């Protein structure tokens, strides 16, 4: 890999219930510590959290304000409904890794890493002198081990049960939620995935999803700007 491909910054975003929503996604993340020896200058973040916690909204706002920024959404890699398993209650098992084509998502990430300055998932036409940034948002990013080596900073958005249920009831899903789906599948799977990440050794920054969109954006944006400034300083001094 050439030096010109090495200077990318990646952000991962995840949520506990990642089916496509008419209103968009939500945001969470982790900061890349090391990809390969030659990619030490490539920042990357991962964000995750409870369903309807605000991850996609945050990711898209970060993309709008950060230069040379791309976004990959885990929701874009769901398998067709015909391939989704059902449990004994008849609930479609969307909130599991088996419902996703993770190999395709990893391929999309690899393509960005090979040429971050010319990524098809970037909407930014600003100066290519800026460090490339990749935000990856989804609902099961901390639970997929092949992703573990990629990130610099990780965010996890949380909201209480009642607020989560209220927000989900206002969303339009395809396929739509059946009665009892939130309590019978969505919330139990979130608790299961949350328990799994309790044993993760790297630092996860937990965000309060009940805060305003502007407050969440300001916190993460300022942190990422500081990290980018450090990366630029290291590039100049090395």
Image (tube, rainbow, N blue to C red):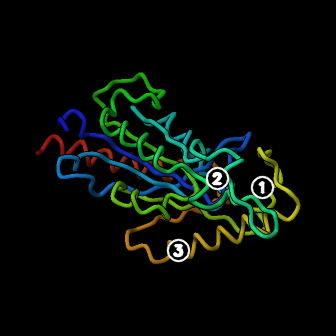
Mark 1 touching mark 2, by CB under 8 A?
Answer: no
From this viewpoint, which residue is outermost toward the top? 125
Q: Earlier in the sequence, mark 2 or mark 3?
A: 2
**Marks 1 and 2, how far apart at CA:** 14 Å
Category of crowding for the residue at label 1, using alpha-carbon neighbours closer than 10 angstroms: few (below 14), some (14–19), many (at least 20): few
Residue 217 at x, y percent in the picture: 55, 48
Q: Residue at x 40, y 68 (%)?
A: 203
| Label 1: which secondary element | helix
232 vs 162, nearest the viewer: 162
* Mark seen at residue 196: 3
Q: Residue at x 55, y 39 (%)?
A: 61
Number of numbered discs overlaid on the protein picture:
3
Q: Which residue is mark 1?
A: 167
* Mark seen at residue 37: none
On screen, residue 93 versus residue 141, left or right, reads right
Q: Which residue is mark 2?
A: 18
Mark toward the viewer: 1 or 2? 2
On screen, residue 13 versus residue 209, left or right, reads left
Q: Quadrant of residue 236?
A: top left
Vertical side of 72 occupied by 201: above or below: below
Q: Quadrant of the C terminus?
A: top left
Q: Residue at x 65, y 57 (%)?
A: 211
**Marks 2 and 3, how far apart at CA:** 17 Å
Residue 11 at x, y percent in the picture: 43, 48
Category of crowding for the residue at label 3, using alpha-carbon neighbours closer than 10 angstroms: few (below 14), some (14–19), many (at least 20): few
173 vs 32, nearest the viewer: 173
């Amino acid at each position: 890999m050439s030096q010109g491909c090495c200077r990318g910054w990646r952000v991962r975003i995840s949520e506990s219930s990642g089916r496509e929503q008419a209103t968009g996604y939500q945001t969470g993340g982790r900061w890349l510590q090391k990809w390969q020896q030659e990619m030490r200058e490539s920042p990357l973040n991962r964000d995750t959290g409870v369903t309807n916690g605000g991850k996609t909204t945050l990711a898209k706002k970060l993309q709008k304000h950060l230069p040379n920024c791309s976004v990959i959404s885990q929701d874009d890699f769901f398998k067709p409904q015909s391939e989704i398993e059902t449990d004994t209650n008849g609930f479609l098992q969307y909130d599991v890794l088996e419902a996703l084509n993770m190999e395709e998502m990893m391929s999309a990430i690899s393509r960005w890493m090979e040429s971050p300055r010319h990524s098809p998932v970037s909407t930014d036409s600003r100066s290519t002198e800026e460090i490339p940034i990749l935000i990856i948002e989804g609902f099961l990013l901390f639970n997929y081990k092949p992703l573990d080596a990629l990130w610099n900073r990780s965010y996890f958005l949380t909201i209480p049960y009642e607020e989560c249920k209220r927000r989900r009831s206002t969303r339009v899903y395809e396929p739509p939620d059946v009665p009892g789906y939130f309590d019978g599948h969505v919330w139990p799977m979130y608790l299961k995935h949350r328990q799994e990440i309790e044993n993760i050794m790297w630092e996860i920054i937990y965000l309060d999803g009940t805060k305003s969109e502007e407050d969440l954006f300001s916190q993460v944006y300022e942190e990422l700007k500081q990290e980018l400034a450090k990366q630029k300083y290291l590039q100049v001094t090395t």
